[in-house]
Amino acid sequence: MLDGHWYEQEYGKDVCKEPGAGCYFCPEDDPCDFEETELPLTRFGDNTTLKSVPRSGSLVLADREAADFDFSVARVVHWGSPSKPHGFFGLSRIPTNSEEYEYSDDSESLIDSLVDHGLIERPSYTFRTDTTQNGFSITGQLTLGEKLDESTAAKHKWQTIVYSEKFHEALATVWVSSVKLSGGRRSLLPLESRASEYPGPNLTIIDTGGPIISLAIPGLLEDLEKLLRLKLRRKGYEDEKIARMFRRDENGFLYVKQRVFKYLPVLKLRLNDGSNSVSIKIYPQHYCVGVESGELGLMLQSGTVSVLGTPFFWAYSIYVNFHDHKIALFRN
């Protein structure tokens, strides 16, 4: 939860009433002390960093209730996306690599706490995206503790949660074997030839809280720009006019005029390889968001960690079962 007093001071009165804000107002007789020098930090795939104060309270989930349920009240140290900060309902587990993550020995993930308190049966979740909306964050139906009906299993794209030294099996991670922009003549990420240049970009986090798709591929947006310029030239646009069709902001995000939307490429990713590989497609309507300037913001970035965030979920819903180490994707 975000510290409501801090959030309203930073972003205006009543901002906590907005959907997804996730505010908690520490009572005056038991305030949250953010002046402590050794507050725990939480880092996400897009480099968002929060400092937090531990609290406890009662939690009601459906017809079940748990007392003394631990949660955190947080303030933002660094926010890694163009969207406004918001609270987090964490769906991942805590990696057991204590040297990499700043968690105390008695820390427990939210989803494991829900199991231990008897609120859900297993550490799993299903998120079905509400595709009638669009924006920097997703909305939809979240079901906790579900066991996916095996009779419908053939309808889904199944993957195994990838084990890694960094994340272990605590996050919904997949193995991306290739990335391609439709209309391009070459794959952006043939691992056999470019592994030395891009060490390990194929380990990818599927993050319900991530607002963008970030891929550890230097030059991703430059390749997209080149492809877009080529298409516009073929349609008769002159270079001077093409230059006015898109721009970059100070954070490196790409914005384009709405009239060139139909020329934007499809982002194609292949998960895993061999007989268990599956292909997924992220269309422009999934990775573009309308902004106040009348332009379209492309929620794509090159980064140090590969993350499939909001644009991915406009295209696919997901089932994750940490007990069985399985992920299922179904097209929206």
Image (cartoon, rainbow, N blue to C red):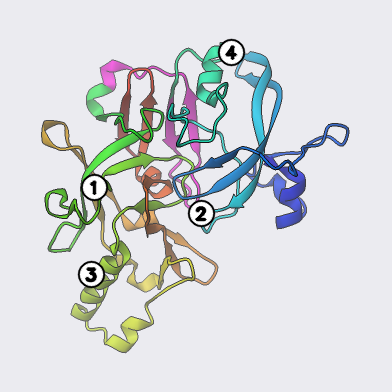
Q: Which residue is mark 2?
A: 80
Q: How far across and how far down the image is residue 310, in percent?
A: 43, 47
Q: How far across and how far down the image is residue 223, in percent?
A: 25, 67
What amino acid does circle 1 point to? Leu
Q: Residues within 10 Å of mark 3 (few under 14, many from 20)?
A: some
Q: Nearer the viewer, mark 4 or mark 1?
A: 4
Q: Earlier in the sequence, mark 3 or mark 4?
A: 4
Q: Which residue is mark 4?
A: 117
Please identify the quadrant where the C terminus is shown.
top left
Q: Which residue is mark 1?
A: 269
In the displayed structure, would residue 210 be above or below residue 146?
below
Left or right of residue 23, residue 44 in this image: left
Q: How far across and how far down the image is residue 38, in percent?
A: 66, 39
- Specify the quadrant of the image occupied by residue 147: top left
Q: Number of numbered discs present?
A: 4
CA distance for labels 2 and 1:
23 Å
- Specify the quadrant of the image occupied by residue 208: top left
Discs 2, 3 touching: Cβ within 8 Å:
no
Q: Which residue is mark 3?
A: 227
Q: How far across and how far down the image is residue 231, in percent?
A: 22, 73
